[in-house]
Amino acid sequence: MSRPDLTTPWADRGELRKLLLAARDVNPRDFLLVALLGLNGLRVSEAVGANVPDLGSSGGHRTLRVTRKGSKRGVVPLAPIVCTAVDEFLAGRSVGPLLPRLHSSGVVMDPLAGISRQTAYERIRFLADWAGVNPELSPHSLRRSFVTLALQDGVPLHQVQLAVGHSNPATTMIYFKDAANLDDNPTFELAKSLVGVEA
């Protein structure tokens, strides 16, 4: 069985920032989609399956209850910028999907229905194009970016593993392996030592 994570592109810090800013400019729902995938590392199924009543609080944090792989329940904290976006977008709405379908005008469609995984994929592609970043990014790319950037920042492996709901730390490391190989590849030092800094 092949592992798609080994070929899934990921967004570096600058690309993820551009994607978040572009999504914020387009509409609040798209910002929430990118934030849940890229800042919380959710699976696309977890993000599109979230409902407004799944929002809560615990230990002084605003939270979102999600249904993990294997129908396991999990709770993720929401960053303050995401909480603000949620509150502004919901504007008092207390029912329905967290990521609803929208009219072209940006108004939530009636009857309330959540976006599909396919719509999430299409929105990420659209936003990547809008932001001028890698057009091959997908929802899974943002999950992989979360893992990669967190590990690059020195977050302990077990904390990243718990955040993304992996049962095995080896799975979490698969997401990071290619990035670590690219960043730490000896080609850079060898080129520097053989032909100088400007090579």
Image (spheres, rainbow, N blue to C red):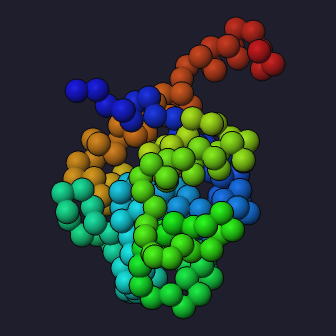
- Residue 87 in the image: state x and y as whole percent: 57, 84
Q: Quadrant of the N terminus?
A: top left
Residue found at x 40% / y 40%: 175
Q: In the rendered image of this protein, does residue 94 appear above or below residue 182?
A: below
**How many tags in the picture?**
0
Q: Quadrant of the C terminus?
A: top right
> Is residue 107 visible in this depiction of the protein?
yes
- Residue 82 in the image: state x and y as whole percent: 57, 73
- Residue 139 in the image: state x and y as whole percent: 48, 48
List the single residue furthest toward the front.
111
Residue 170 relative to residue 186: left or right: left
Residue found at x 46% / y 76%: 111
Q: In the rendered image of this protein, does residue 85 appear above or below residue 105?
A: below
Residue 84 relative to residue 145: left or right: right
Residue found at x 73% / y 63%: 25
- Nearest the eye: 88 or 160: 88
Residue found at x 39% / y 35%: 5
> Is residue 150 visible in this depiction of the protein?
no
- Residue 144 in the image: state x and y as whole percent: 45, 45
Residue 153 relative to residue 42: left or right: right
